[in-house]
Amino acid sequence: MSLPTLTIHELRQKLRAGEVSAREVTEAVLERIAAVDEKIRGYLWLNPEDARRQADALDQAGACRDGRGLGGIPVAIKDVINVAGQPGTCASKILQGYVAPYDATVTRRLREAGAVLLGRTNMDEFAMGSSTENSAWGVTRNPWDLERVPGGSSGGSAAVVAADEAIAALGSDTGGSIRQPAALCGCVGLKPTYGLVSRYGLVAFASSLDQIGPFTKDVMDAAILLGVIAGHDERDSTSVPRPAPDYVAALTREVKGLRIGLPKEYFIPGMDREVEATVRAAVAVLEKQGAEIVEVSLPHTEYAVAVYYLIATAEASANLARFDGMRYGLRVRGEDVVETYGRTRGQGFGAEVKRRIMLGTYALSAGYYDAYYVRAQKVRTLIRRDVEEAFRRCDVIATPTTPEVAFRAGQKSGDPLQMYLSDIFTISCNLAGNCGISVPCGFVRGLPVGLQILGPAFGEEQVLRVAHAYEQATDWRAQRPRL
Amino acid sequence: MPEMDIDHVAHLARLELTAAEKQQIGAQLQDILAYVAKLNQLDVTGVEPTAHATPLQNVLRPDEVRPCGIEREQFLKNAPEQARGLFIVPKIVE
């Protein structure tokens, strides 16, 4: 068995037994990257020497012998999360040359757990997109079909995990940016509850929606990685002061009597019928294991995309005001300071970022604030109530992660609205602040399909338990992309 | 639906756009605004707006200076222009 194909928990056993060293694992992953990343282009930045040094230091300290934590496990990080001493561009020209002066809290926790921080993964610029085509540094390819997108915005993280170019990765999810690419690339992706994982050191896109979460090869690994990054951090005032539970202990394989809600609004006309059939078959597997299937309703689902694109762009227009050419990144001089701002931002930002800043600025501007922004916030309340109401009738909700499999590069890039609609099943979870996971549940025309399991706020244990029970009853992971 | 004044919004956003960008973004935003107009179908009378989904309110800490453990130089290295431990910025006040 080649080392890069193994999971965190499989590698931990080998590292503990002394069968392999951190250096050997890192070397094997670096070889894999050298062999396939030319095709995938999942990494924006990689420093093999630095990765080897980290691995050697862990070996010398004996940090991989306790069988816990992430000792000696190579992890890739989305280009929006700071790693001290590594570049961080958010896949934007406006941050070209930026080197992070400090670690994000999640980065610090990975280091403390003994992970080898491999490099930076590609993404849609400032996490705005669903295909990774909005990167200023080129597109990432889907390992299952190089003509297709890996999803987005964390497409690089999803693709490198699916292609065995990292054992696990971190991404961020504002409207589906972890779950959607995980589904399209055939790996596991989890968006934690708002407030569970610190965002200190994450470049902010939409602050009321952003969460950091794991990409992994299986559900056990997602539980392990979430356990490392979750927990209170005084440096993020939205971080909730409650202890993170033992997520691995939650994987009991037991779903008997658990109520799984199926929202009728998530099986819609126009979605890929084979995707729908695949997801229904996955739900039937859970039913066979003793789960009870109940119909639930999320009546305001059809408004979620509209609410999201007003709230997320409004928040982004404020958050991205900091990129003004003064303290970091690009500066394009004008006659005066206002012209310098305008030119810097006009030349530094890509098309989608400009579009969203314009929409958000408009939604917040005098005369339109109540009609757009406040109305969207009110409908957000209705969406949140729907979710809370649904979780009175069930323990978790099962849906397709996406309405279709990975689409072709270029297919939607000319039509922003069509691109936005590809997030239709993932957005409500960010608006309501609850948690969700995407787990592989089969293939349609050779491309992976994701089953989304949503849980209530801080319901990660239930979500992981159900995803794990499903995964253990199936063997989709045996199928691998041919590269 | 009102026509968006692209020049005004671009100025508010401090975003210099080319003529071609103005035309393209203008057309795309009209489509998107037509789509989000579906929110007007709902009666939201008496519904409180949701700004965020955290149960926390007013998270405060003592107003004390604490070392951040990072040298000033580390931050200044990323500046487009710097000198004598400071960011150099364009003249703002005459």
Image (cartoon, rainbow, N blue to C red):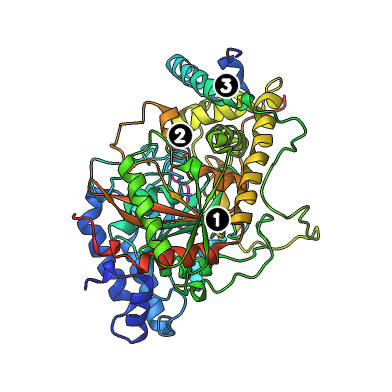
Residue of label 3? B10
Residue of label 2? A420
Mark 3: secondary structure: helix
Residue of label 1? A435
The region drawn magenta spans A93-99
Q: Which comes before the other along the chain, label 2 or label 1?
A: 2
User: Toward the viewer: B1 or A48?
Assistant: B1
- Where residue A170 sits: x, y (%)? 45, 58
User: Toward the viewer: B56 or A25?
Assistant: B56
Q: Real-space Cα distance between discs 2 and 1?
A: 20 Å
Q: Quadrant of the C terminus of chain B?
A: top right
Q: Nearer the viewer, mark 2 or mark 3?
A: 2
Q: Quadrant of the N terminus of chain B?
A: top right
- Where residue B12 sits: x, y (%)? 63, 23
Whether pointer 2 and pointer 1 mark residues with C-beta atoms closer than 8 Å, the reply is: no
Residue B15 at least partly seen = yes
